[in-house]
Amino acid sequence: MSTLILGGGVTGLAAAWHLQQRGEPAEVWEAQDTVGGWMKTLPWEGGHFELGPQGVLWQKDTAVDRLFSAIGLPFNAPGKGARWVGKGGRLVPVPASPFGLLTSSLMPFSTKLRLMLEPFIPVRAPEPEEGLSAFAARRLGPGVARELLPAMVAGILAAPPEVLSVDAIPKLLQWEATGSLVNGVRKGGVSHMVVPVGGMGQLPIKLAAQLPAVHTGIRATALEALPDGRWRTTGGGEVRESDRVVLALPAYEAAALLAPAAPVSAEALAAIPYTTVDLWHSRHTPLPQLKDGFGFLIHPPEGGGYLGSLVPSWMDPQSAPAGLMQLRSFVGGAFPRGADLDRWEGLFARLRGWIPELSDPAAVRHERAERAIPRPEMGHRGRVKAALAGLPAGVDWISNARFGPGVRDILEGLETWGK
Ligand SMILES: Cc1cc2nc3c(=O)[nH]c(=O)nc-3n(C[C@H](O)[C@H](O)[C@H](O)COP(=O)(O)OP(=O)(O)OC[C@H]3O[C@@H](n4cnc5c(N)ncnc54)[C@H](O)[C@@H]3O)c2cc1C
């Protein structure tokens, strides 16, 4: 069977890799001049920065571990690293263990007590779809849903949990299905953030190097059903006829291609919203209290559109030149933002509000991640179901909007996809 995969981000490339392992080699078309989609590590004087993902959640004997081992991708595993939540005007440490939560000042005693009841909360049937905030309030208590969840979710999806479906974070329902979240985490084990040596961009580069037919600079512009059940794809001066076409594309790109052949699918895909986020990379004199930490997220009502900052130089020591600490600050997403955050000076003033000791930057750069992150709002489950049900034979759509937001979700989804 001949397969054409559209999209050479991590989803398309990992899908092609899995097909190849099953003896079904596929051709990949990527619109940009380089592979990776959002997963790109770009050079920056004396180091580098990530365009998209900063790291991937790794655990022994999981899909991520299996893929990394199979393609021979070495990675840095920096360990747990301190993390904080910006709340009440200061950075409050997030405890590394459940026991630490009991003594933490992150939440009042009543909220902690309610949290401890989680293992005893009955499992709810997954239908009908539940909101993410409602899920957290039901299982972890309204205090956690109100005071802690918004910062955590802003750090993953750059959107408020009140508008999102619980399907936005697929692990939650998987864990609940084991009896409780505590049980799910205990059974599933804890993952750690790791970064391939040389940066996240090494993953798509390594995948592409092991695939026979990855073509960059070809944007598919039309998809047409042939009378014999095959598909004709056109784009960038190329025409390909194949038994199967796999759209490894953001929902809105897939919708545009599918509109003529699968209008119901296209309509459902076009209704999946995407979020834009601004990323500011900056280099500073290392601060003892921050340099060996993962970073911090701001409780959104206090952030006013500033979502938080990570410390890439801790996760990936090659990213910054020696003697400098690299930060990556997130702005905007689906939150209203102050006009001051359009400029570095405004963001820097906010950063200093949380970390008064932060030095003036040695270097700064800005990237806008336009429509980069799917926003699985309530009704997402129905939209994905309708999109998949409406696909004609021989066409499939795979994406983080289908499998889950993180690289781990995508790689787990692809291990069983199409089997
Ligand atoms: C700022 C940011 C930070 C993130 N941080 C993390 C993190 O720390 N950890 C984590 O696990 N995940 C993170 N993510 C999520 C993760 O990066 C994504 O889930 C993942 O990279 C999505 O990959 P993809 O291949 O599905 O999509 P994309 O990366 O969007 O790739 C799709 C590809 O399709 C191509 N394309 C589009 N249209 C066409 C066409 N018509 N023809 C041919 N090709 C086409 C595009 O050029 C693109 O290369 C982050 C994402 C962003 C944006």
Image (spheres, rainbow, N blue to C red):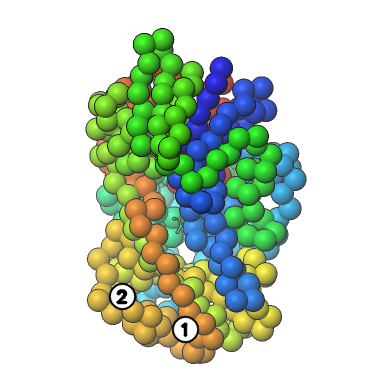
Q: What residue is shown with label 1?
A: 355
- Report helix, strand or loop for mark 2: helix
The earlier-in-sequence mark between 2 and 1 is 2
Residue 118, x across and y down, in percent: 45, 46
Instruction: Please give the residue where the numbered disc 2 appears in the rendered image.
Output: 342
Q: Residue at x 30, y 23 (%)?
A: 261
- Number of other residues with Cα within 10 Å of mark 1, as a class: few under 14, some 14 to 19, many 20 or more: some
Between circles 2 and 1, the one closer to the viewer is 2
Q: Report the Cα–Cα distance between label 2 and label 1.
A: 20 Å
Visible residue check, residue 382: no
In front here: 194 or 72? 72
The response on whether ligand 1 sits within 8 Å of label 2 is no
When the figure is inspected, residue 253 is found, relative to residue 163, above or below; the finding is above
Q: Disc 1 on helix, strand or loop?
A: loop
Residue at image point 49% right, 21% down: 242
Instruction: Pick the quarter of the image with the N terminus.
Output: top right
When asked about the image quadrant of residue 369, the answer is bottom left
Classify residue 66 as left or right of residue 95: right
The type of residue carrying mark 1 is Ile
Q: Which quadrant of the view contains residue 50?
A: bottom right
Q: Position of residue 410 (x, y in %)?
A: 52, 40
Between 15 and 53, the residue placed more toward the observer is: 15
Q: Amino acid at mark 2?
A: Asp
- CB-based contact (under 8 Å), mark 2 and mark 1: no
The number of discs equals 2
Name the residue located 45 percent from the left edge and 34 percent from the top edge. 238
Find residue 195 and report its horizontal and vertical position in percent: 64, 57
Which image quarter holds the C terminus?
A: top right
